[in-house]
Image: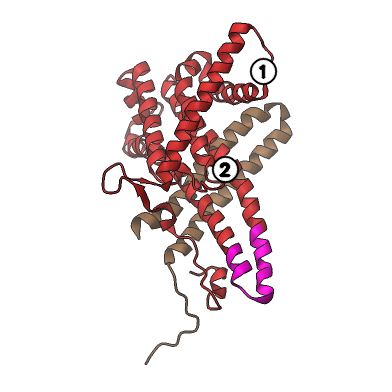
């Protein structure tokens, strides 16, 4: 490692920087079967159950409020209304309009809350790793987004959707030699790949940063001697700051993922000019 | 004759590659945000829409840096 921290390596104790093997924790159950469960998979399952329970409670609250006509929401209900309205108003309706927004709202809401729920475990104590920091979930979500925007396009324009996106109008004929491969690459290959990679890499980088900060803190406080341990205060503060930053990143990635899915759907639905 | 090692470095060259890959998107994200701030200063009433576009621009630009981060895992 070229990092500055490796300077302290030769002294007493070994500082081991985090590596990619952080993301391959040991298997805890069902080893040897295709259903082997490790720590990350367990966190995902827990998050899934929590999401289902929270949404179930929210819908129960909303139904009750509608039935009794009690329009003053409690704290829990208010949070739900804010969160659901955020996706509905400022993502779906803003980008797709009322009609198409409502059509794709269930999918967009699912994507938003699933990404957020899986991201936020990265900073929750004792979980400490994001469910999205292994390719599985980002890949599934990107696949869903991919299928959805192709579905939206072909449903509206039929086979002309592919013609419109591969041969954009207003381009002189000979230029299609250049334009078509680029469009093919950017629309049908890079879109899902970047969707999955953006989420995955943000979570991997975030987790590695946090591990680096806190393992350096541990090293400085308990293994480095003398004045060197003062560095630990700095790394601890950095770790704390990055934890706050990670909260921002998990919300932002959920927002960006949902927004991009929406924009792809919107582009697929748009009439050709 | 043996070559003299002036400075010996050990590690993975991919680290340098990632450093290089981060330059472009860094400048790009800076440009996106600075232009958004400029536009909001000119037309504060459009702030909401401009911010949505800003996040989109950042997401697209940032993807390049993240591809840079991903390649060493794939090709090394």
Q: State the CA–CA distance, disc 2 to disc 1.
A: 29 Å
Please name the residue that numbered disc 1 is placed on.
Answer: A73
CB contact under 8 Å: marks 2 and 1? no
Please name the residue that numbered disc 2 is placed on.
Answer: A249
Which chain does brown denote in the image?
B
Can residue A181 be seen in this snapshot? yes
Which chain does red denote in the image?
A
Residue occupying image coordinates x 50% and y 22%:
A56
Mark 2 crowdedness (10 Å alpha carbons): few <14, some 14-19, many ≥20: many
Q: Chain of mark 1?
A: A
Which x, y percent locates residue A4?
A: 57, 69
Residue A62, by quadrant, is top right
Query: From what the image shows, is residue A86 above or below residue A119?
Result: above
Q: Find the residue positioned furthest to the left.
A: A33
Residue occupying image coordinates x 52% and y 24%:
A55
Which x, y percent locates residue A168?
A: 38, 28
Sooner in the amino-acid sequence: mark 2 or mark 1 = 1
Local SS, label 1: loop
Which x, y percent locates residue A73?
A: 67, 17
Pick the residue in front: B75 or A201. Answer: A201
Can residue A263 be seen in this snapshot? no
Residue A79, by quadrant, is top right
Q: How is the image coloured?
A: by chain
Residue A186, by quadrant, is top left
Magenta highlight on residue A73: no
Q: Where does the magenta region start and end?
A: A217-236
Mark 1 crowdedness (10 Å alpha carbons): few <14, some 14-19, many ≥20: some
């Amino acid at each position: 490692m070229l990092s500055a921290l490796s300077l302290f390596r030769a002294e007493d104790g070994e500082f081991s920087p985090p590596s990619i093997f952080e993301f391959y924790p040991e298997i805890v159950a069902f080893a040897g079967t295709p259903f082997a469960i490790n720590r990350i998979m367990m966190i995902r399952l827990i998050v899934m159950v929590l999401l289902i329970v929270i949404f179930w409670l929210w819908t129960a609250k909303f139904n009750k409020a509608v039935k009794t006509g009690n329009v003053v929401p409690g704290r829990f209900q208010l949070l739900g209304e804010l969160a659901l309205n955020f996706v509905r108003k400022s993502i779906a309706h803003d980008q797709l309009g009322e009609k198409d927004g409502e059509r794709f709202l269930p999918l967009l809401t699912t994507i938003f809350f699933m990404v957020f729920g899986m991201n936020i475990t990265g900073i929750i104590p004792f979980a400490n790793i994001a469910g999205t920091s292994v390719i599985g979930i980002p890949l599934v979500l990107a696949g869903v987004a991919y299928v959805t925007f192709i579905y939206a396009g072909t449903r509206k324009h039929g086979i002309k959707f592919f013609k419109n996106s591969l041969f954009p109008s207003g381009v002189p004929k000979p230029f299609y030699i250049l334009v078509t491969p680029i469009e093919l690459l950017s629309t049908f290959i890079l879109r899902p790949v970047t969707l999955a990679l953006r989420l995955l890499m943000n979570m991997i980088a975030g987790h590695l940063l946090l591990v680096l900060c806190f393992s350096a803190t541990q090293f400085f406080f308990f293994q480095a001697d003398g004045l060197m341990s003062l560095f630990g205060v700095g790394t601890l503060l950095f770790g704390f700051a990055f934890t706050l930053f990670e909260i921002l990143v998990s919300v932002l990635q959920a927002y960006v993922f949902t927004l991009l899915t929406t924009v792809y759907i919107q582009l697929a639905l748009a009439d050709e000019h | 004759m043996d070559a003299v090692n002036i400075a010996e470095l050990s590690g993975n060259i991919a680290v340098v590659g990632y450093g290089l890959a981060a330059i472009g998107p860094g400048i790009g994200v800076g440009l996106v945000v600075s232009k958004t701030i400029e536009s909001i200063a000119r037309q504060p009433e459009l702030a909401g829409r401009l911010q949505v576009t800003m996040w989109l621009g950042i997401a697209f630009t940032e993807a390049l840096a993240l591809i840079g981060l991903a390649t060493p895992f794939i090709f090394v």
